[in-house]
Image (tube, rainbow, N blue to C red):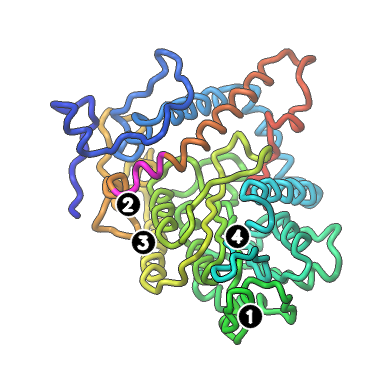
Amino acid sequence: MPATTYTPPHLRASSDDASQRHPTSPTASYGRLPTGEFEDTRTMGPALHYFYTNSPAFQRCRQMKRRYGDNDVVNQKFAQNRERSRNDDQNLAPMFRDQFYQAFSDMVDDLGGPECLLDPNPTTGAARFVRRFADIGCAPGGFAQYLLTTFPQCTGVGVTHPDGYTMTYQGWTNGMQQRFPVHFADITSTPGDLVTRIMPDAELPITPPDSPSRQAGRSHLNRSGHNLCDVVIAGAILCNARTRQGQPVERAARPLLAFAQLRMALSMLAPGGTLILVSSANPNVFCLEILALIRRLFASEVRSTKGRRLHEIRSAYYIVGQGYKGTNPDVLRQIDEAIGTLKRRGAMGPSEWSGALEDDDDVAYTGEASGSCVAPAPIPLLLHPHLTEIDILRSDGPWLLKHYEPLWVRQADALERALARVSKPEGDRRSWRRSGAFELDASTAK
């Protein structure tokens, strides 16, 4: 389908054109936006404009994020937390791990408990339990610790960046460490080759009788080279010198990491398995692409979840896909091509890259041209370069709204509560860390 020129509804000749281009929201209107706080939609590309005009929840979330980000007390406290995190990583790692352990426990409870982490046995309907898992971006180990302790007979394999957060084994038994070997590597380098290198470690001499592979009759998974995982967590979050200082990151860094770990996860996951993938509630076009793809690769409804306390004020959340339909070579090839495109873009200078403005390199991913009164052109898709974001809105727009809106409501509510706390006089404030108003910068740890 050829790309079309996008014009915001308020600049069109009639409202009929708008209804033809974008479906309306299938969900109820969430939240309230005070009068006079609407944004100038002329700077928004198709996807951003679609969500903003169809979702009061999204409007309110953006408003609360601006208020929170403009608060001097908030900025000062976050700067202090970043400095502490940067200089005291070894001592903070156990705390971060425990936070993510609890967050993963919350997310599993949202799914219905450990027995619901995997789809039931398709033949008998019996619950299946995790026998083998992979954790991409595993440090400092909270998610892995939950699975190793909840499923005592399971084994796993982890991978984390050598310059990232510390993998901590404090409180782990020797047996737990042996059941979870960790590889240190940059997953964005050659994700396909990395899978080949680390997968043998996922096959350890433990084969519990209640394993999903046995119950589903997938004995072929025990053969050498076919040791796929029942659960794959792809939770690596960008961590480099810029993120540690609270600065904007390189233009291609986030989508490159997202597609690289998705490539690994889809190669490591067994048919019928569960994917848990970190993403952002900011509807960047590459996030929409990944969501639309996952929706088609899993048999069960794709859901969203996050911890009840950890990162409640942040945009990070986890996509949960259950009932994997199996590896599709064409999909892996498309992801490899997208990774190659992103690497080429990352090597370009600002003036070389797709005509993007030098002071707004992110426009090609966010769809927002700050400092301009003209909406940016529709963004070409990474997986399907002949299509644009408009095509995703036509095929998946209502579903995407339904997926995102609960996240926007929850984040806006959390930000509103946090702002109310920091607005109190100093003597009236509760512990900021306990209340969640300020989080230590553990967003890159897990």
Left or right? Give the position of 421 relative to 225: right
Disc 1 element: helix
Rendered residue at 78%/61% (across/down): 149
The label nearer to you, 4 versus 2, is 4
Distance from the alpha carbon under mark 2 to that under mark 1: 39 Å
Give above or below for 160 relative to 60: below
Q: Is residue 293 left or right of residue 380?
A: right
Crowding at dot 3, Cα within 10 Å, few <14 / some 14-19 / many 20+, comes out as some
Q: Nearer the viewer, residue 387 or 275?
A: 275
Residue designated by label 1: 200
For label 1, the crowd category at 10 Å Cα-Cα, with few meaning under 14, some 14 to 19 and many 20 or more, is: some
How far apart are the two marked residues, 4 and 2, measured between alpha carbons?
32 Å
Give the labeled residue for mark 4. Answer: 233
Residue picked out by circle 3: 341
For the residues marked 3 and 4, what is the alpha-carbon distance in whole angstroms? 25 Å
Distance of label 1 from label 4 (alpha carbons) = 17 Å
Q: As rendered, which of 160 and 274 lies closer to the eye?
A: 274
Which of labels 2 and 1 is toward the front?
A: 1
